[in-house]
Each structure stands twice: as C-alpha cells, then as structure tokens.
Image (tube, rainbow, N blue to C red):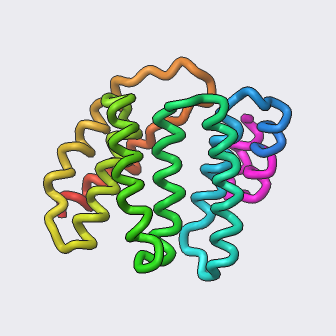
Amino acid sequence: MQKAFGLWEKGNMVEASQLFERISKTEPTKWLPAYYAATVEILGSFNLKEEAVLKAKLTKAQGFLDTAKSNSENNPEIIITQALLNLGYIAFDGQKYGMTLSEKNNQLYAQALQIAPKNPRVILGNAEWNIGAAKFFGKSTKPYCDEVKRAIKLAKEETVKEEFYPKFFIERAEQVLKECEK
C-alpha cells in the first residue's frame, strides 16, 4: 500500500491504480485497496474530454467501489466516494447527468451524515456539494462556510487508528473555505 501511495503522490495515477487493484485482488476481504483504486480512477476522470474514456474510467471505478462496499457495508467513506464518482459524470456533462445524479448525491450525503455525523470528510464533501449547487443556481455559498469550518475543527480533533484509513486534507479544506467566503 505504501508503494501505491508513493506512486499516487508522484502523479503516477495509472500505476497507483493498478497497484491498488492488484492489492485488492490479493486482499479480497479488505475494503481499503479497492476503495483507493476507485478513488484514483475517479480523480483521474475529471477534466476528461471524451465521454467514452470517462465512462470506461468511471465504470472501472464503480467496480472497485462495489468490491469495497461488499467488504464494508454502510461505510461513510465509500458512500461519499460514490457521490464523488457521480460528480465525475455531472462535471463532464451537467445537462446529461445532473438531473439523474444530483438527487442521488443528496441522498448519499444524507446517508453518510446519518451514519457518521462527525466525520470531517463527510461534512466537507457535503458542504462542497452544496457550495457547488449554490454556485450553479446563483445562490450564496455563505451558509455552507460554517460546515467547512466545522469539518476543519473536527479533523484537527480526529484520531485515526486504522492504517491507511482515508485522511482529511486540511490545506484543501482551507482553500474550500477561502473560496466559500468570497
């Protein structure tokens, strides 16, 4: 897993995804390798220009997420990553995918918040989703800034005991907060 994270950190997304995939096949009862394989694929889908490439990447990511879900039901980290996958489609073509996937994302965030109301990644993901929707509809993002602040506060207090458990990136959250407060 360390090697896969190292590849990812260096920007070698394909190699990182492939290594996470190989690890998930050798550790079929663990959710984290499949979760990270999906995450790398999803993040690599943003800014793609060809729909066929996008669909292939996100279909592959969905397979990994399904594997992760089968090993860890009702896991808020997996639930919000499903919402991120949906956002990949929406960001590609909001007209085509927004109508069907936006409500699903609202439901996914509500589900994740119900399971883990103090999970800073869930809170931040939900706030970012709402900020994006507010911007799209020309509304104020200010109501969601407090949620971003709350996520940052909770992240600073969080103690993670499981090795390789998803981390909260405070720098990124602070950038979201700065954008939110504009």
Residue 4 part of the magenta-drawn span: yes
Instruction: Using residue 34 as the reference point, say whether residue 142 is left or right of it.
Output: left
Chief SS of the magenta region: helix
Instruction: Using residue 132 as the reference point, say whether residue 63 is left or right of it.
Output: right
Q: What stretch is highlighted in magenta?
A: 1-19
Question: Percent from the top left, x then y, of residue 16?
Answer: 74, 50
Question: Percent from the top left, x then y, of residue 160?
Answer: 49, 22
Instruction: Using residue 65 as the reference point, say whether residue 47 is left or right of it.
Output: left
Residue 97 part of the magenta-drawn span: no
Res 166 → quadrant: top right
Instruction: Using residue 66 as the reference point, say whether residue 92 is left or right of it.
Output: left
Residue at the image position 62 percent from the left and 78 percent from the top? 51
Res 131 → quadrant: bottom left
In the figure, 107 relative to 1: above or below? Answer: below
Q: Which of 180 and 84 is in front in this view?
A: 84
Residue at the image position 43 percent from the left and 62 percent from the top? 101
Q: Which quadrant does the C terminus fall into?
A: bottom left
Residue at the image position 78 percent from the left and 45 percent from the top? 21
In the figure, 145 relative to 132: above or below? Answer: above
Question: Percent from the top left, x then y, of residue 11?
Answer: 67, 58
In the figure, 148 relative to 12: above or below? Answer: above
